[in-house]
Amino acid sequence: MGPGAGFLTKRRTPEALLGCVAHTCQASYGYPNPLPPTPSPPPPAAPAPAVLTVGYYHKTCHNVEKIVREVVEEAQKADPGIGAALIRLFFHDCFVRPEKFGIPNFPSLRGYEVIDAAKEKLEKECEGVVSCTDIVAFARRDATILLTEKKKFGFLDFLLGDRKSNFDMPAGRYDGNVSLASETLPNLPPPFTNITVLEDMFRVKGLSLEDMVTLSGAHTVGISHCSSFRDRLPPNPSSMDPTLAASLQGQCSRGDDPTVVQDPKTPDDLDNQYYDNVQKRKVLFKSDAALMSSDTTSRLVDNHAKDLREWLKQFKAAMVKMGSIEVKTEANGQIRKHYQFVN
């Protein structure tokens, strides 16, 4: 479900799925607007083989989730925006094989350093066992919990029965044998697309319209560079709330490509405020505003705006589902030694 300049400061850095970037001095999301011609989307993804299971590493590397969780917690303390960076990293990892230098990823995508730190620790404990793709999935799960609960969580949170942090992440993925920058543009939804294209891009990955609307809620955290939505500001015609548009126009006039928060009310909380913003036309991207352009998606927006608990439940389920996209197995994958590079 990108890095570079994001290492320069320790400001808060929540980010999201489609059009925002981490909250450090990170470069813009990286999409050219408009997009250059790209190949047609691939055919719908075949169902993932039944290889993903909860507790997959219980016998081979039983401390894997504990180690990843500790690394994520330490990273979050040092840089409170890294959790949101891991959300976006997981999204990109699921939609495209791990690739750092594709246009939407470089230099804005980050979080690689967290995965590398966890991988280094795991290699010392159980060398060559845990895939980088599974580490990303665990890290994204832990980041979600940190951003929704805003408290330190312990190992028992994942073992006890009814709890807010109940978010089991199946594992058993292998890493890809190749990384291609050319795969990023055709596969990653840009922040300025319409509802039809969004639905199609999620559908070919095996995700429903409901999944798409639910996962878009990650845009309640993070920031965006003005270049990602400047065409929605005056004097251009736009459905954006006029007061917000005027405020953003002022903020975006400072410097070449400044950043603004996506959700001024709860910029650091992974909650359902995003859906209230969508309803009130207080969102940055065309892709967000597009959710009110059909009866089906607007109904889903309304439902999520009303019920935080149910949205979080569906969000976590959608993340698990997204983690099953085009899963690699031992037959067509590998256990990478480094996340960003094939062996």
Image: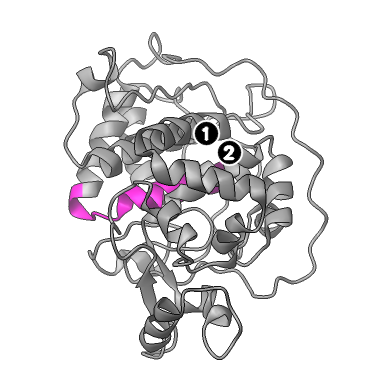
Classify the position of the N terminus by image quarter.
top right
Q: Is residue 107 above or below residue 318?
A: below
**Residue 291 lies in the magenta stretch:** no
Sequence-wise first label, 2 or 1 = 2
Q: Position of residue 203 (x, y in %)?
A: 71, 41
Q: Is residue 50 visible?
A: yes
Q: Position of residue 95 (x, y in %)?
A: 62, 44
Q: Secondary structure at mark 2?
A: helix
Give the numbered dot on residue 99.
none
Q: Is residue 159 above or below residue 214?
A: above
Work out which residue is located at the far top of the displayed protein and give it.
59
Check disc 2 and report the residue beneath it.
211
Residue at position x 42%, y 30% in the image = 313
Residue at position x 74%, y 48% in the image = 200
Q: Position of residue 121 (x, y in %)?
A: 30, 33
Residue at position x 59%, y 86% in the image = 236
Start-end of magenta stretch: 77-94
Instruction: Decide which of 53, 337 is in the foreground and name it.
Output: 53
Check disc 1 and report the residue beneath it.
318
Residue 61 in which image quadrant: top left
Q: Is residue 341 visible?
A: no
Residue at position x 56%, y 35% in the image = 322
